[in-house]
Amino acid sequence: MISFVKGIIEEIETDRVIIENQGIGYQIYMPQSDLEIMKSGEDVKIYTYLSVKEDAMQLFGFLTKEALTIYKLLLGVSGVGPKGGLAIISTCPGDSLHMAIVSGDAKAISKAPGIGNKTAQKIIIELKDKIDLEEIIVNSTAEKDAAGPASQVQKDAIEALVSLGYSQSAAFQAVKKVNIADDADVEDVLKLALKNIF
């Protein structure tokens, strides 16, 4: 019903923001990672999900479409409500949630308030096939810089670490920390990534 809200940040609270748009103040619940980078008076566009219950209508919002997409996927898992989904995204922001799902890291997901190990396992089982590791790597590289070859080197380095026995999650995090030079090959990235693991 409400795809996004565009306006000026009036107020930032601990778990929500108030956006003024044409004289109307929209209260939107948001993850901590988004709230931390927002400033009062800024112009902002927030992608939203409207939760309708018998006793309340609440807006939940995110600064990216990707975050909204994973949020909607989380809501499709039984036992995960709008506030629970928000808690998970606050606890595992960005690619860390994707990696936790892909690598089966229930411990990381269950750190979210109100999310037990059973629910975390259910999230992994139901969403694992819907998360594309390759897409995560490409998106992560695109964020660092728009260089295409770097993503291939990154991907190869992650695959090499996985073949050495590391989890996909640990391999991804280690490679992500490496500042990849334009002329770097897989071996160079691998050496630096191994330092990040230990």
Image: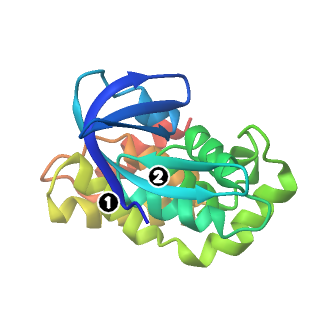
Q: Which residue is mark 2?
A: 95
**Residue 113: quarter of image:** top right
Who is closer to the viewer here, 84 or 185? 84
Who is closer to the viewer here, 173 or 96? 96
Lower position in the chain sequence, tag 2 or tag 1:
2
- Is there a contact, CB below 8 Å, between mark 2 and mark 1? yes
Residue type pointed to by label 2: Asp
Marks 2/1: CA distance?
Answer: 9 Å
Relative to 145, say whether 186 is above or below. below
For residue 198, say whether it is visible: yes
User: Residue 179's x, y, as percent?
Assistant: 26, 40
Decide if residue 197 is on the left or right side of residue 157.
right
Q: Which residue is mark 1?
A: 139
**Residue 7: quarter of image:** top left
Who is closer to the viewer here, 37 or 10? 10
User: Residue 2's x, y, as percent?
Assistant: 40, 60
Describe the element under mark 2 as helix, strand or loop. Answer: helix
For residue 157, say whether it is visible: no
Residue type pointed to by label 1: Asn
Residue pictured at 64% horizontal, 42% vertical? 87
